[in-house]
Image: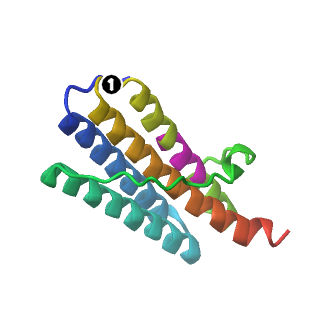
Amino acid sequence: MEAFKSIDDILDFAINSEQEAVDFYTQLAEQSKIDEMKQVFTQFAKEEMRHKSRLMNVKETGSYTMSEKKVKDLKISDYVVDIKPHPEMSYQEALIVAMKKEKSAFKLYMNLSEQAPNPDMKELFLSLAQEESRHKLRFELEYDEFVLREN
């Protein structure tokens, strides 16, 4: 686990993680041979770019707010099998990939919050974890709506 010495180190790490997510979804969009999947992955990439911009704004302004609102967890990602991304993925598979990716990011930030050397860093990690939890919920709701309801 990476050691952070400042809030800027945390933000740089988080910004880099969001850029990796942008790159990941962009690559999947480029590889996809199905137009619907290209659109889905492009949308995911844009969402991650917005998160990166938000973090860059936090770094620039030095202010962030942590929502007190608890994020619901449908736990769908706990019960679906891992999917290796591939160009011919179905919409269901794409949602599984996205849920699992956001769940991993959530766990990372929660682990970092437990190791935070001061309350400010802990709060920032918890805020980032909460944001990833919101992303996962979005994909779980989409999965529930378009996959589980059809079956």
Q: Quadrant of the C terminus?
A: bottom right
Residue sitting at x 28%, y 47%:
15
Question: For the view shown, which residue lies furthest in the bottom direction?
Answer: 35
Q: Quadrant of the N terminus?
A: top left
Question: For the view shown, which residue lies furthest in the front direction?
Answer: 68
Residue 38's spot in the image, x, y percent?
50, 71
Residue sitting at x 62%, y 63%:
88
Residue 52's spot in the image, x, y percent?
30, 56
Residue sitting at x 47%, y 42%:
105
Secondary structure mostly seen in the magenta stretch: helix
Residue 97's spot in the image, x, y percent?
59, 52
49 left or right of 89 in image? left
Residue 14 higher or lower than 140, as above or below: above
Q: Quadrant of residue 13?
A: top left
Residue 61's spot in the image, x, y percent?
14, 54
Question: For the view shown, which residue lies furthest in the right direction?
Answer: 151
Q: Which amino acid does label 1 sit on?
A: Glu
Residue on which the image places disc 1 = 2
Which span of residues is magenta-colored?
99-105
- The front one of 47 and 123 is 123
141 left or right of 37 in image? right
Residue 118 in the magenta stretch? The answer is no
State the count of labels.
Answer: 1
